[in-house]
Image: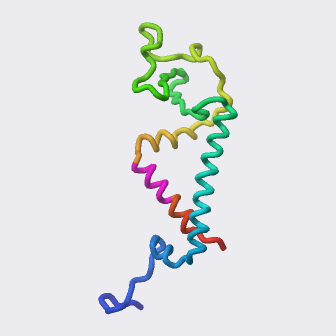
Amino acid sequence: MVRAGAVGTHLPASGLDIFGDLRKMNKRQLYYQVLNFAMIVSSALMIWKGLIVLTGSESPIVVVLRDNGDIKFLTKGDNNEVDDRGLYKEGQNWLEKKDVVGRARGFLPYVGMVTIIMNDYPKFKYALLAVMGAYVLLKRES
């Protein structure tokens, strides 16, 4: 039993003691975890670049909100400060399905909500990335 206020005693380590776990690792384990994290990040980037090559598009995956079944688009070029409404015909604020030349290759409902939530709440995005990074770095092989 640990007495409070006793000199030289420590409270039991919690499961969230990140720096304590890092100190317990030897250099080889730490290097392995950092390399494992780097492999995960580079794999995600390779998958993204592969999708760009396969689809021939700079944005191979996009999120489209469908409230009532009417599909409308607002486009914006990658290097433009504003949207492309100035290029639409006069009085047109949105593109409709008939205005789009292209084809959807897949449809995954509700998966894009993750992207929307992370864009709307950037602190959540950074917290989630920090937790995932800490998990990968601190996860030990059994």
Q: Report the residue at 43% width, 50% height from top.
A: 124
Instruction: Report the residue that reaches farthest toward the top.
Output: 90
Does 74 sit above or below residue 60?
Answer: above
Please provide percent x and percent y for residue 116: 48, 39
Q: As drawn, is 133 to the left or to the right of 51?
A: left
Q: As drawn, is 97 to the left or to the right of 103?
A: left
- Find residue 51 and report its image quarter: top right
Q: Report the residue at 45% width, 11% height from top.
A: 92
Q: How is the image coloured?
A: rainbow
Q: How many marks?
A: 0
Q: Report the residue at 51% width, 24% height from top.
A: 68
Q: As drawn, is 141 to the left or to the right of 23?
A: right
Does 99 sit above or below residue 73?
Answer: above
- Find residue 82 and report its image quarter: top left
Q: Report the residue at 32% width, 88% height from top.
A: 4
Q: Is residue 124 magenta?
A: yes
Instruction: Pick the residue in front: 3 or 31.
Output: 31
Please provide percent x and percent y for residue 44: 61, 48
Magenta-colored span: 123-131
Q: As drawn, is 1 to the left or to the right of 58?
A: left
Quadrant, the N terminus = bottom left
Does 94 sit above or below residue 3?
Answer: above
- Find residue 14 and report its image quarter: bottom left
Instruction: Report the residue that reaches farthest toward the left.
Output: 5
Q: Main secondary structure of the magenta part?
A: helix
Please provide percent x and percent y for residue 65: 51, 30
Instruction: Pick the residue in front: 60 or 1.
Output: 60
Please provide percent x and percent y for residue 19: 45, 72
